[in-house]
Image (cartoon, grey):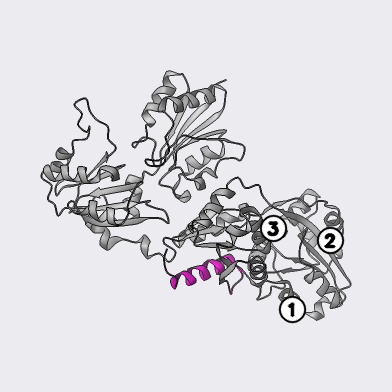
Amino acid sequence: MSGKVFLVGAGPGAPDLITLRAAGALRAAEVVVYDFLAGPEILKFAPLSAELIYAGKRGGGERAAEQSEINRILIERARAGRRVVRLKGGDPFIFGRGGEECAALRAAGIDYEIIPGVTSAIAAPAFAGIPLTHRERGSFVVFATGHHDAAKDGESAVPWEALARAAHGRGTIVMLMATGRLKEILARMASGGMPPETPAAAIQWGATAAQRTVFGTLENLPDAAGRAGIGAPAVIVVGECAALGRELAWVERMPLFGRRILVTRAAERAGEFAARLRALGAEAIEFATIATAPPSSHGALDRAIAEIESFDWVVFTSAQGVASFFARMRERGRDIRALSRAALAAIGPATAARLGEYALNVAATPHEYRAEALVEAIGAARIAGARILIPRAEAAREVLPETLRELGAREVVVAPAYRTIRPHREESDRIAAMLNDGAIDLAAFTSSSTVDNFVAIVGAEAARRAKAAVIGPITAATARACGLEIAVEAAQYTIDGLAGAIAGWFAGAPRR
């Protein structure tokens, strides 16, 4: 039985600018054939089991796969009954040869679907504050490619002079793949009658942390872009609307604009933190260094759940501990009302919030996110003579149970509810290279485990090149022991607190 091919637009590069339908197609993909501009953060939507096939090229560098070879791969994999995603930067039908690939699939009798994407021709100007239309400055838009595609007479297939005459004072011309021939193209527009003072702009790596914008005119933009080192991939905008970017620029004003931050949190929790950083303008790279798995044995936890009514306190030291504990309660067929006798303690607001999702109130939460402060929040009088359950990670500090025993707890039962493991990281070489190149501004750590695993995965030498942002003193101590430089230490031990501390630190830090 034949499979199906999805021609998917990956958008301009930021993972939160991909469409919901595109993300859904990637999550269900068995094969992903992708281009250079479909970045690694977007590929993370695909299952680990998916076959990834690189078919693109990096502007002027490595050779791209021939279109006929790409067509062959798509047809071959689909005929084998597999769900194939052809992932293209931007939109598959804007200078992406999507039409050629559809024609080849149709001729081969292969079912296909088109999923549009946000083209960089629109996204890059928007992120530079350039509206492509304006009631007083431009009533139409022309999209053109600057890539040389000669007609039979040897001249470019794009009538630049005619476009210049049509757009002068009335429209906007947007060019992709034009940096290599920018001087020639703009000179032809000038020969078509467009005034040399016509506003123009070049936007490189639009909608990413590497975004750079150069404003100029038809006459001087090539030299200005050259001095600034603007190269592919870039979007060129010519027309009166381009001038508006100088006053309407917005993304540069965001507190974390241009910053690339590594998020090392567990994969299932990394998205929440990354979203907060992106909302502040950062490019957040999710590089989970920790994953969770069932404990080696559920024995201790199952015995505790069976006699849950006998505990005076249940103390949770992480949000994951809450989730794992109640998942096991459900599996063992216990009613949540069996907890009615026990008071609940949470090590921090995130853990308390997770308990709140079960409509459970917390009797003790410390002001500091550490075991010693949690003991103080419960209070010695409530600890003495109490039977206390701690459902937690399999490997954890013993400070909390030992302190509770020292303060006279009748019994402290430590029950592993989950264990933390080091995930397999196929992209560790890429992250290590970015660290060595100074391309990572900050690495954020939310636990000692994320620090230890980060160092083990990328190597001590690369890890020490990262400036660290940490969520609390325990994580900070681990980072220092590993030789990392602490740049940010959150005073409030929450994700929001860490994000705010990062933004505050960058407010006074020089840009790359």
Locate residue 432 relative to residue 291 in the image: left or right: left
Question: Reading the chain from its start, which is encountered first: label 1 or label 2?
Answer: 2
310 in relation to 95, above or below = below
| Residue 210 placement (x, y as % from top left) | 41, 55
Look at mark 1 in the image and give the residue it sits on: 376
Quarter holding the N terminus is top right
Task: Indicate the quadrant where residue 444 lies.
Answer: bottom right
Q: Which mark is residue 308?
A: 2
* CA separation in Å, label 3 and label 2: 19 Å
106 in relation to 186, above or below = above
What residue is drawn where x is 42% and y is 18%? 107
Residue extending farthest left: 193
Q: Is residue 447 magenta?
A: no
Residue extending farthest front: 461
Q: Secondary structure at mark 2?
A: helix
* Residue type pointed to by label 2: Ile
Question: Reading the chain from its start, which is encountered first: label 1 or label 3?
Answer: 3
The residue stretch that appears in magenta: 490-511
* CA separation in Å, label 1 and label 3: 23 Å
Q: Which mark is residue 320?
A: 3
What residue is drawn where x is 51% and y is 42%? 23
| Residue 131 placement (x, y as % from top left) | 27, 53
Q: Secondary structure at mark 1?
A: helix
